[in-house]
């Protein structure tokens, strides 16, 4: 993989020109993407900006995020060839930091569940996950150092785990979702994919101008609270192996690790996530559903058809539960630094007919806390497995610092 | 003015056909809009839906709200002729309820402060207010029974007061802002303009499917807490007259009325509203600012130029203050039903070079509580004045019920 922070250092020191760095990404895309299919479209030639902390960094943008220079097709024939007028604010944040937008990465239709043609770079018989399939796969395959995805259920952390890359779903609204095709306004969150947590921190700090996000060297080992999310069902063997590997490595590196039992309201919140998601989707996609019903991808169409009866009263009740859950979760972070749990039930499932299950992700999207995926190990089939580190709402640097501690602990224990 | 609820009753009873109702609005636009200039564009012919609670209701849509059937020009040459792909969710909510989208109403550029060409129907030498100028004026001039606007500072309640119409800025996110050009995602709120509060309730209930919004006959007179918002400066004579007329009428009709002094944190919140608004605007309008700077309307451009230095730290601090202010305000509603305050400093100022001052509105947009404008009287220059009724967050029906009580009390006292 291409390390963003490593590229930054080499460019800063004059070892590498920004144009060369971008050109190498373009070459890698030309060479490898025929096989992986991570891009919907990409630049034919590209120049780097001369200044800015992200000069020389080629970035892939999930194809539900508006770009003025590339079509934005939402993974759906309904938007074939669609050209937005403006770049989304998150795209402008990248450009202002000097990054080069290199192309648009595949997305499931409207960031829902119908798979993309993208393959998992580690094993082509397995899904790369979704909905941010192309963003996870393009970073994993070493084509680009940074990509944007979005998460409404588990669409950033799950594909990152399946593809063995680092990813952050920041605190809700740290990054604006303006100009990002909406599925659920209470849940949709823009996230970043990169080689490691330091790379994520460099990318996020550069685009937001929040230099404090760079302070990811923890002064002391963080305290971890392990949660198994029993309300979401059992993890698979590979997922459990990943969690055990992470907590053993953390303990060996001097961190305190204890099992946390989440209050009942968080199980309730997990249960009502789909109500908020689908009630809002019926509004957000009302035009597509009302005027292009038969062109909506089949899994999404069936889900929308099946939830058309959701009422405002059910939605209001669900929002009340989500509000109380956020309060209860806040108290847990009074006694620990971060939570540690599965990024997905296990390694990427076989086949391309499913993008996998977001059941271990959706609670954390609902509460809005920052989550970072940390790869733990590979299965016998060479498939990556990951765990997610979750910090208090607004403590994105804490999530990144604990993820970095865990990455280093895992590297040492190998 | 055309009463939406009256039209509904006549259509329901077969006295009026939906097509005739829509045709009359179209005729009124053809006749009166040459003078007022409330529409950017409108349908040349239109048919009503055959069913739905809003069949026969012609609606005007502020021109920052996406429509698939009309251009959406944001009040700016940067978007001249721009055709969105999809209708915004709020437009689809109207269509599903049977309403007819009759045209797009004028907006200041990107819903900021540069005036539109629209005149105040009550006195052409005065501004109709802004930014939702066309929506307020088209309802006030009796062209249409319902129009959509948006409020980020005071862009719904202020023009409603200046034009003498009822308007509601609902609880934040009761109506989705997806497909509405963003200025500030934490503040932007879609609102409705109509002849009276019953009309607002009928429109809002029909489009949301929330029948409980129709229960606006208060079982007992509401208790009013009067706030003068001294932190925002003094009202003008006409504004003060309006507030006094409203509270006297309410008392005479049997309501309890007492003066409330707001805790200091609410003055702080009033003070930081512009920080949140402009920090987010720099993201939301980053593409326009970065690529079409000189085409941005002059007052907005100057405001953006002047706030380019706002930092993430200032923004974070402002969000913290807003959060605490919402908590403190919630406690006030434990002892009263609604607050009563000025909708604007006074009647519409003379001239068309300013849309007026949102200083009595911005706190209420920041906290997200529902606000309803109630016209109180006319000045000697025939200019309407209004007060706003503010209810607890989520209690939109309470705001509408108290507004209705006040409308009736004011009618009796005349």
Image (tube, coloured by chain):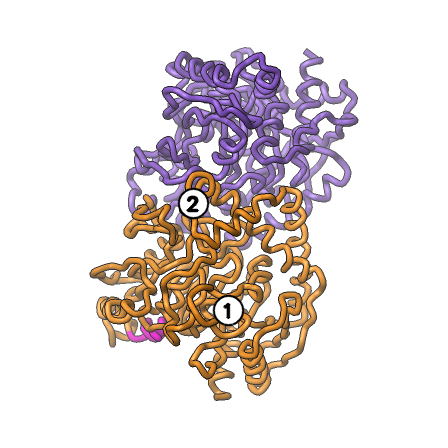
Chain colours: A orange, B purple
Chain under disc 2: A
Left or right of B221? Residue A391 is left
Residue linked to disc 1: A372
State the quadrant of the N terminus of chain B.
top right
Left or right of B301? Residue A337 is right
Residue linked to disc 2: A294
Residue plotted at (37% across, 73% down)? A124
- Please tell me which of labels 1 and 2 falls first in the chain: 2
Q: Is residue A165 magenta?
A: no
Above/below status of B112 relative to B242: below
Above/below status of B141 relative to B151: above
Magenta residues: mostly which secondary structure?
helix
Q: Position of residue A45 (x, y in %)?
A: 20, 61
Q: Quadrant of residue A135?
A: bottom left
Q: Say if residue A377 shows up in the picture.
A: yes
- Residue range in magenta is A1-10
Q: Position of residue A259 (x, y in %)?
A: 67, 76
**Disc 1 to disc 2, how far (Cα)?**
37 Å
Left or right of B123? Residue B366 is right
Q: Say if residue B155 shows up in the picture.
A: no
Chain under disc 1: A
């Amino acid at each position: 993989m291409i390390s963003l922070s490593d590229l930054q250092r080499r460019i800063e020191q004059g070892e590498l020109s920004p144009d060369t760095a971008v050109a190498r990404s373009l070459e890698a895309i030309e060479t490898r993407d025929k096989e992986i299919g991570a891009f919907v479209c990409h630049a034919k030639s590209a120049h780097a900006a001369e200044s800015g902390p992200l000069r020389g960094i080629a970035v892939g943008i999930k194809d539900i995020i508006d770009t003025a220079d590339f079509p934005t097709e939402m993974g759906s024939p309904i938007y074939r060839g669609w050209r937005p007028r403006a770049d989304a604010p998150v795209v402008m944040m990248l450009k202002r930091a000097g990054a080069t937008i290199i192309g648009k990465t595949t997305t499931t239709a409207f960031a829902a569940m119908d798979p993309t043609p993208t393959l998992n770079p580690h094993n082509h018989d397995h899904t790369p996950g979704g909905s941010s399939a192309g963003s996870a796969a393009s970073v994993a395959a070493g084509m680009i150092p940074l990509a944007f995805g979005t998460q409404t259920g588990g669409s950033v952390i799950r594909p990152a785990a399946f593809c063995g890359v680092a990813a952050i779903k920041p605190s809700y609204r740290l990054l604006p979702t303006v100009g990002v095709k909406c599925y659920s306004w209470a849940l949709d969150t823009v996230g970043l994919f990169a080689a490691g947590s330091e790379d994520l921190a460099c990318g996020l700090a550069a685009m937001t101008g929040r230099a404090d996000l760079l302070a990811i060297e923890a002064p002391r080992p963080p305290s971890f609270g392990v949660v198994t999310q029993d309300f979401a069902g059992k993890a698979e063997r590979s997922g459990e192996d990943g969690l055990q590997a992470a907590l053993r490595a953390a303990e060996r590196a001097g961190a305190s690790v204890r099992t946390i039992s989440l209050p009942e309201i968080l199980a309730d919140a997990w249960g009502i996530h789909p109500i908020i998601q689908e009630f809002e989707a019926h509004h957000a996609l009302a035009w597509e559903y009302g005027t292009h019903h038969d062109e909506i991808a089949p899994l999404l169409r069936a889900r929308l058809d099946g939830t058309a009866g959701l009422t405002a009263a059910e939605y209001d009740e669900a929002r009340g539960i989500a509000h109380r859950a956020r309060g209860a979760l806040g108290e847990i972070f009074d006694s620990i630094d971060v939570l540690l749990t599965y990024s997905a039930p296990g390694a990427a499932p076989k086949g391309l007919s499913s993008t996998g299950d977001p059941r271990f992700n959706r609670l954390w999207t609902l509460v809005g806390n920052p989550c970072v995926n940390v790869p733990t190990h590979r299965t016998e089939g060479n498939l990556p497995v990951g765990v997610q580190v979750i910090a208090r709402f607004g403590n994105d640097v804490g999530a990144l610092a604990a993820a970095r501690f865990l990455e280093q602990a895992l590297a040492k224990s190998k």
